[in-house]
Image (spheres, rainbow, N blue to C red):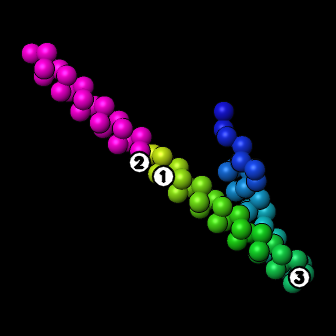
């Protein structure tokens, strides 16, 4: 199950960011509201970028661990011969 963050899941935040973009693109959004939307969008964007970096680091660790396990298994097979 996906881990819920205090600000919502990644997908929820991405959806909110899409709503913000639509609001900013609307010609009927007042200037003050546009500024507030922009500020919220910047915060969400930074949070999403941080989450992506965290996932990227975790994937790199998993790949390194997987490579180490494969090498260890190969060494074990050679020792058995």
Q: How far separated are the C-alphas under marks 1 and 3?
A: 36 Å
Identified at 45% across, 45% down, the residue is 59
Identified at 88% across, 82% down, the residue is 32
Q: Taking 56 as reference, is 27 above or below it? A: below
Residue span colored magenta: 61-81
User: Which is in the foreground here, disc 1 or disc 3?
Assistant: 1
Residue 6 x, y percent position in the rendering: 75, 50
* Outermost bottom residue: 31
Query: What is the magenta segment's predominant secondary structure?
Result: helix
Q: How far separated are the C-alphas under marks 2 and 1?
A: 6 Å
Instruction: Kindly tell me whether residue 22 is visible in this rendering.
Output: no
* Outermost left residue: 81
Residue 5 x, y percent position in the rendering: 71, 48
Residue 19 x, y percent position in the rendering: 79, 63
Q: Earlier in the sequence, mark 3 or mark 2?
A: 3
> On the image, numbered disc 1 is attached to which residue?
56
Identified at 73% across, 55% down, the residue is 13
Q: Which mark is residue 32?
A: 3
> Left or right: where does residue 53 sit relative to residue 44?
left
Q: Earlier in the sequence, mark 1 or mark 3?
A: 3
Q: Which mark is residue 60?
A: 2
The crowd level at tag 1 (other Cα within 10 Å; few <14, some 14-19, many 20+) is: few
The crowd level at tag 2 (other Cα within 10 Å; few <14, some 14-19, many 20+) is: few
Identified at 35% across, 35% down, the residue is 66
Q: Taking 35 as reference, is 50 above or below it? A: above
Count the marks. Answer: 3
User: Which is in the foreground here, disc 3 or disc 2?
Assistant: 2
Q: Label 2: state its secondary structure.
A: helix
The crowd level at tag 3 (other Cα within 10 Å; few <14, some 14-19, many 20+) is: few
């Amino acid at each position: 199950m996906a881990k819920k963050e205090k600000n919502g899941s990644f997908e929820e935040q991405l959806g909110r960011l899409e709503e913000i973009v639509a609001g900013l693109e609307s010609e009927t959004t007042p200037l003050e509201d546009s500024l507030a939307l922009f500020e919220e969008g910047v915060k969400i964007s930074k949070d999403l970028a941080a989450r992506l970096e965290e996932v990227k680091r975790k994937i790199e660790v998993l790949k390194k661990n997987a490579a180490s396990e494969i090498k260890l298994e190969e060494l074990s097979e050679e020792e058995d011969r």
